[in-house]
Image (cartoon, rainbow, N blue to C red):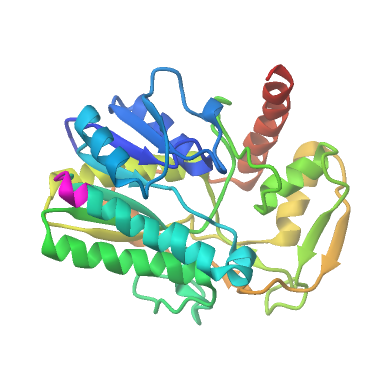
């Protein structure tokens, strides 16, 4: 697929997945700019030379200026809130940050004539599927406000693409983990809830234990099973998806992003023990609200639609890259 790169605006580009998408775009020669309000993002995560706008995707005036200044032809949208239990406790925050603000962003993109939109959706839109492998045809019945807030955005994009000259791709992430193999960015959020992030923090002495939420799920060892995808492989899928949207402007896409293999919480912690050659203390806790027992993708459509070949589909590799970034992060914060 040969595509002439067009200017891309990455929302939430100072955050975890967004910053990896910025690197993937830059590495592939795409002009890229970033908007981020820095509530959960970090200015250091945006590479030198990338135009950066500190602000909110609800700010229509700022978005209009960015689109005009940058000649934006595509949006990659990562800005939003992502913690499932928090969404249960504070649903209005999630419907505001993930749905209402995205409506403002889409409206600004339509007004500016931006023709392509890539959205970071989630496997949480499937709720608790009754299948071993989740396909794009699996019913989307979220069980928490986070999943609903993302599914509402998928519907908005479908309706907008039918009414306006904009196509879109919704990529439904399974569990994203790891860090840039070159150590340029990674998961930097303090108090993050991602299991591998939490576990490598514990391995480095930043936490005294790892809580295992739920030991009575209907899985092989009783703990939750998830499909972990390396963040750099996920970022690569975004670039390929953008190429596909440009190549076929009348087509929109919705695809799962995972490897099609699940690991339990205990298996992940075993991998961290293995990579670090130490033993993390595990504390068994009750299930968290809104957590399904198992979520494993069927990524067949992604692989059939895009020339996507995962480069880091190995749990120990994912853990190793996350660990390296955690060590690097300590240096950044010390230097800062």
* Residues in magenta, as a range: 109-113
Q: Residue furthest bottom?
A: 130
- Residue 53: which quarter of the image? top left
Residue 11: quarter of image:
top left
Q: Nearer the viewer, residue 221 or 136?
A: 136
Residue 307 visible in this rendered orientation of the protein: no
In magenta stretch: residue 112: yes
Query: Residue at point 52% right, 40% down?
Result: 15
Quadrant of image for the N terminus? top left
336 on left or right of 14: right
- Asked if the stretch drawn in magenta spans residue 56, the answer is no
Point out residue 60 in the picture as x, y percentages from the top left corner: 29, 46
Provide residue 20's location: percent of width, then percent of height: 47, 36
Q: In this rendered view, identify the residue nearer to me: 229 or 121.
A: 121
Nearest the viewer among 257 and 20 is: 20
**Residue 59 seen in this snapshot:** yes
Relative to 281, 201 lies left or right: left
- Indicate the quadrant containing the C terminus: top left, top right, bottom left or bottom right: top right
**Residue at horizontal 61 percent and vertical 42 percent from the top:** 318
| Magenta stretch, main secondary structure class | helix
* Residue pictured at 12% horizontal, 58% vertical: 164
Position of residue 131 measured from the top left corner of the image (x, y, whole percent)? 49, 79
Residue at the image position 49 percent from the left and 43 percent from the top: 17
């Amino acid at each position: 697929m040969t595509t002439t790169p067009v200017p891309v605006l990455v929302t939430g580009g100072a955050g975890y997945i967004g910053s990896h998408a910025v690197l993937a775009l830059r590495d592939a020669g795409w002009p890229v700019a970033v908007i981020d309000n820095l509530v959960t993002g970090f200015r250091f995560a945006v590479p030198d030379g990338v135009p950066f706008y500190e602000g909110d995707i609800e700010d229509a005036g700022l978005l209009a200026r960015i689109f005009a200044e940058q000649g934006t032809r595509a949006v990659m949208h990562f800005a939003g809130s992502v913690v499932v239990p928090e969404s249960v406790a504070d649903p209005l925050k999630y419907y505001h940050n993930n749905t209402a603000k995205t409506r403002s962003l889409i409206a600004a993109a339509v007004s500016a004539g931006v023709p392509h939109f890539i959205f970071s959706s989630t496997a949480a839109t499937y709720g608790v599927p009754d299948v071993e492998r989740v396909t794009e045809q699996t019913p989307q019945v979220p069980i928490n406000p986070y999943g609903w807030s993302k599914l509402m955005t998928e519907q908005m994009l479908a309706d907008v693409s039918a009414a306006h000259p904009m196509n879109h791709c919704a990529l439904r992430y399974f569990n994203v983990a790891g860090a840039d193999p070159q150590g340029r960015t990674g998961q930097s959020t303090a108090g993050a809830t991602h299991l591998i992030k939490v576990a490598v923090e514990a391995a480095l002495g930043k936490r005294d234990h790892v809580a295992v939420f739920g030991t009575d799920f209907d899985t092989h060892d009783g703990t939750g099973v998830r499909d972990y995808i390396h963040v750099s492989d996920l970022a690569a899928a975004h670039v390929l998806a953008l190429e596909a949207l440009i190549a076929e402007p009348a087509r929109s896409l919705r695809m799962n992003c995972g490897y099609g293999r699940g690991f339990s919480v205990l298996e992940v912690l075993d991998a961290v023990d293995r990579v670090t050659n130490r033993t993390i203390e595990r504390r068994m806790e009750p299930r968290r609200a809104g957590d399904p027992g198992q979520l494993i993708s069927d990524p067949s459509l992604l692989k059939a639609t895009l020339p996507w070949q995962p480069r880091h589909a190995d749990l120990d590799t994912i853990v190793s890259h996350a660990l390296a970034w955690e060590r690097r992060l300590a240096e950044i914060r010390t230097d800062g």
